[in-house]
Image: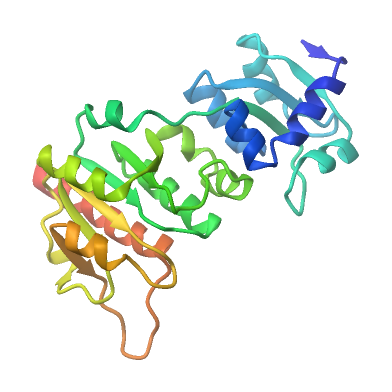
């Protein structure tokens, strides 16, 4: 049922564009029908939904209503005042945080793991999360120097994939790598100077792919902490791929190797 009592919810949603408010309340915004629908189908984290009347949002409204989630109609101007997107969405939701405790996540069965160690660009972070979800990664760990998981640009870039891969944030990377090693998960860093071409690495065994900063890659500290580094060969004179694309190449190679092994 659509409710007209919207002022409190609208004001509350506006504040979630600030990281300090998000962290205090452990709530964030999901913008766009695709992301909202994925959240509604994959988790119970959504608290409220806002829609523009002219938007074709019948499916997300139906899903929200079936779960007893309040739905608020707002104008385009109000939606524009809430959203940080250049083109404001017609559908927006407020969600509880979905990240998990890293110690608890490490207790899960981990065959393919992704570690973000200093990825700063929201678009790259979102692309990596989408690729991790697409290949069925068991966990994604976000180091403390990486862009905020709940940054609106990151959430939009995931296109809902954020709700389809277990994730932990603000993790100390060296501690994590040691813990993964103790659990016999091999750690591989993507590095343009790595001695092994990515498709020559054995990615069929339990593996954690570590991805570094866009400008300087993985740090020396990380290189010294992982089991090996892999590179993606490039045509001479061509700059390296951005970290989002590089992650996708290696992750889908891991998926290919595992399919071939299982045939």
On the image, the x and y values in percent for residue 96 come to: 57, 25
For the residue pair 257 and 92, the one nearer the viewer reads as 92
261 lies left or right of 231: left
User: What residue do we see at 54% from left, 55% from top?
Assistant: 122
Count of numbered circles in the view: 0
206 lies left or right of 25: left
User: What residue do we see at 73% from left, 50% from top?
Assistant: 85
For the residue pair 180 and 160, the one nearer the viewer reads as 180
User: How is the rendered protein coloured?
Assistant: rainbow
For the residue pair 81 and 145, the one nearer the viewer reads as 145
On the image, the x and y values in percent for residue 24 come to: 61, 29
The answer to whether residue 198 shows anywhere in this view is no
The answer to whether residue 201 shows anywhere in this view is yes
Does 41 appear above or below 21?
A: above
Does 216 appear above or below 102?
A: below
Quadrant of residue 99 within the rendered picture:
top left
Does 60 appear above or below 128?
A: above
180 lies left or right of 120: left
Q: Quadrant of the N terminus?
A: top right
On the image, the x and y values in percent for residue 51 come to: 78, 29
On the image, the x and y values in percent for residue 189 come to: 24, 60
Quadrant of residue 210 within the rendered picture:
bottom left
User: What residue do we see at 61% from left, 50% from top?
Assistant: 153
For the residue pair 148 and 67, the one nearer the viewer reads as 148
Q: Quadrant of the C terminus?
A: top left
User: What residue do we see at 19% from left, 65% from top?
Assistant: 229
Extreme residue toward the bottom, this view: 237
């Amino acid at each position: 049922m659509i409710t007209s009592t919207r002022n409190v919810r609208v004001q509350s949603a506006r504040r979630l564009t600030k990281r300090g408010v998000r962290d205090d309340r452990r709530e964030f915004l999901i913008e766009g029908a695709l992301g909202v629908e994925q959240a509604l189908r994959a988790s119970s984290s959504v608290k409220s939904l806002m829609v523009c009347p002219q938007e074709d949002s019948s499916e997300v409204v139906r899903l929200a209503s079936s779960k007893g989630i309040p739905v608020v109609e707002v104008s385009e101007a109000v939606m524009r005042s809430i959203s940080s997107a250049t083109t404001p969405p017609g559908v927006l939701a407020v969600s509880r945080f979905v990240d998990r405790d890293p110690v608890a996540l490490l207790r899960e069965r981990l065959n393919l793991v992704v570690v973000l160690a200093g990825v700063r660009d929201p678009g790259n972070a979102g692309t990596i999360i989408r690729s991790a979800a697409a290949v069925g990664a068991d966990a994604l760990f976000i180091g403390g120097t990486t862009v905020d998981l709940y940054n609106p640009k990151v959430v939009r870039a995931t296109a809902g994939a954020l709700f389809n891969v277990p994730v932990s944030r603000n993790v100390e990377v060296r501690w994590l790598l040691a813990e993964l090693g103790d659990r016999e998960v091999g750690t591989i860093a993507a590095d343009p100077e790595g001695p092994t071409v990515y498709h020559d690495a054995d990615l069929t065994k339990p593996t954690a792919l570590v991805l570094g900063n866009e400008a300087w890659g993985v740090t020396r500290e990380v290189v010294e902490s992982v089991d090996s580094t892999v590179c993606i060969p490039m045509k001479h004179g061509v700059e390296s791929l951005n970290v989002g694309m590089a992650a996708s190449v290696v992750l889908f190679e891991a998926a290919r190797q595992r399919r071939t092994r299982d045939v």
